[in-house]
Amino acid sequence: MQGLTALAFQKFKQNYLGMASVFFILFIGFVSIFAYVLAPDSTRYANQMHLSIHSKPPGFDVQMLIQSNPKKGNQNQLEKILFGSKFPDDQQPISSYRVEGENLIYTPYEAKHIEGLEQTINYLQNPKPYVEHKTFYLGTDNYGRDVLSRLLVGARISFFIGFVAVFISLIIGLFFGSISGYFGGKIDRVIMFLINVTWSIPTLLLVIAITLALGKGYWQVFIAVGLTMWVEVARVVRGEVMRVKEQQYITAARALGYTDFRIIFKHILPNIMAPVIVISAANFAAAILIESGLSFLGIGAQPPMASWGAMIKTHYNAIVLGQPYLAIIPGLCIMSLVMAFMLMGNTLREALDVKA
């Protein structure tokens, strides 16, 4: 078994597209976990708004007057890394400033051809205000939020829905598929009827129905997607179990008096995991697309939470308003991640010699 695994791994490594896809997926996973460390805007959901600099193009830079939040020391570092800053600094875009004695006099940034009114704050107050030069590498959205930061934070939803959905679909699919294929008879007919009924309902419609029943939110979407994807796993597992249970080593296991539970989980399932792994990679890609579609429809991740699908929904009008990048960039991210999972699945199919 170890020799076959090593041989499959060698075949996988020889496929450059497959290896590139794995590295890309690992890169997106790293970005998803450490999004708040990498994002210029580390506030929760990267939701810091500056309406005076809304809809700015990529590469836009501005001076920011920053006043530290005295409460930010109350949040531990691990929570800040995983969930963003709960007590963000107060930031205000400014066009110019000067220091006179104890006072810092600044002019707030306003739209073109409009001169802001000068304002004054105490330069020696605690915490002391300071001015920082800030660049928005992918520009700002309609609310003046940093597009790059929301793109990084939004990767979490699109990436982790694959894990949750595939995990749920594997648990349900492996259970029903193995029971149906092993015992056959009435149990098989009942389970196949359930599978066929579930399969006959359009996936997106079923996900929407489950999501509305559970309530709006990203965790509800994760569960809903997982509950609709188990049928593919169950059908594959059922067919493989029906094939493997006729093998001689299974007959020998029955003759030795092993329980059905032990035969299924110790002798059959470990030998049919190759096609299950391949279909799981395809389900990853499908889950990402379904979540993006739900977020676009307004059923998935709810504002102010960032997700790639929600970013497209918010900015699809910008395509005809001269700012197509606001919708195209998250769309390209979705396409790239889905393609990476599909290429990895194809490579796994070839390496594990799974018959399509």
Image: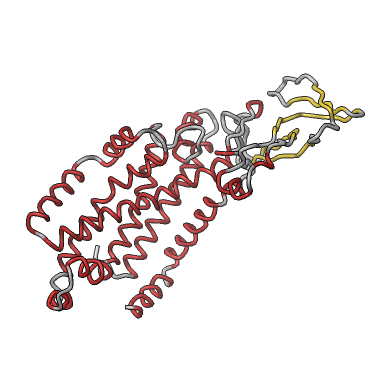
- What is the image's colouring? secondary structure
Of residue 17 and residue 264, the one placed in the foreground of this image is: 264
* Front one among 336 and 225: 225
Q: Position of residue 240 (x, y in %)?
A: 20, 65
Q: Nearer the viewer, residue 61 or 309?
A: 309
Up the image or down, 159 lies above or below 251; here it is: above
Q: Is residue 216 above or below residue 76?
A: above
Position of the N terminus by quadrant: bottom left
The picture places residue 311, in percent across and down from the top left corner, at: 49, 36
How many discs appear? Answer: 0
Task: Give residue 112's position: percent from left, percent from top.
Answer: 70, 23
Q: Is residue 142 above or below residue 224?
A: above
Q: At 74% from the left edge and 34% from the top edge, which residue is drawn? A: 67
Q: Is residue 53 left or right of residue 344?
A: right
| In the image, farthest residue toward the right | 101
Within the image, what quadrant is residue 97 found in? top right
Residue 67 shown left or right of residue 8 in the figure: right
Q: Quadrant of the C terminus?
A: bottom left
Which residue is found at the position 25% from the left and 58% from the top?
174
- Of all residues, the one furthest to the bottom in this rendering is 3
The image shows residue 232, relative to residue 206, as above or below, that is below
From the top left corner, tell me how far across and down residue 314 is, in percent.
Answer: 48, 31
Which is more toward the observer, 4 or 12? 4
